Image: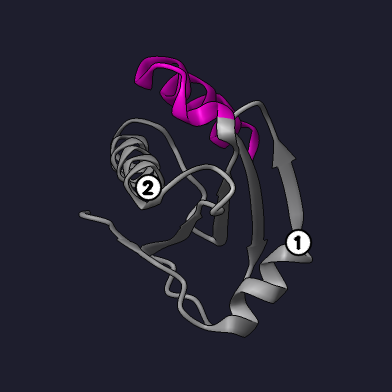
Amino acid sequence: MKSKIISLSKNEDFKSILNGKKLSNKYLTIFFKKLSDKDKNKLNISFITKKKIGKAVNRNKIKRRLRNIMNDAVKKININFNYCYLLIAKSYILNDSYKKIKETLFNEFEKIK
């Protein structure tokens, strides 16, 4: 089964996920929550980078990296599709290597069950 990653779009979805569960590490803060009107075959996930991190080029680079990591994660590890996810990037993510970020993110998603 081919899964598809979909971004969250409604403001009320963002607000409700922020009231859900939270995991945090050096690179990211991950909020997740089950939403009732969600398609179970698709991964609802959004990436947020604040202006404090840097200019638009750096913020877009972070989002591209995270999107690529999540595409690999869907294929390689067992991600719970019942949840909607919100990933908020921290400034450390810009300076570290792709491999370290990927390992950390895979470990965090394996904790979520």
Count residues near mark 1 (Cα–Cα under 10 Å), then give few for <14, some for 14-19, many for 20+: few
> What is the magenta range?
92-113
In which quadrant will I find the C terminus?
top right
Which residue corresponds to mark 2? 63
Left or right of residue 4, residue 23 in this image: right
Count residues near mark 2 (Cα–Cα under 10 Å), then give few for <14, some for 14-19, many for 20+: some
Between discs 2 and 1, the one toward the N terminus: 1
Is the magenta region chiefly helix, strand or loop?
helix
Left or right of residue 111, residue 41 in this image: left
Image height of 36 relative to 113, above or below = below
Question: In x, y percent, where is residue 15?
Answer: 69, 75
Which residue corresponds to mark 1? 20
In which quadrant will I find the N terminus?
bottom left
Write the residue at 60% across / 77% down.
13
Write the residue at 46% across / 18% down.
96
Badge 1 amino acid: Gly
Question: In x, y percent, where is residue 57?
Answer: 32, 46
Mark 2 or 1: in front is: 2
Question: In x, y percent, where is residue 102?
Answer: 42, 25
Residue 68 appears in the rendering = yes
Secondary structure state at the residue bearing disc 2: helix
Reply yes or no: does residue 94 show up in magenta: yes
Res. 97 image quadrant: top left
Badge 2 amino acid: Lys
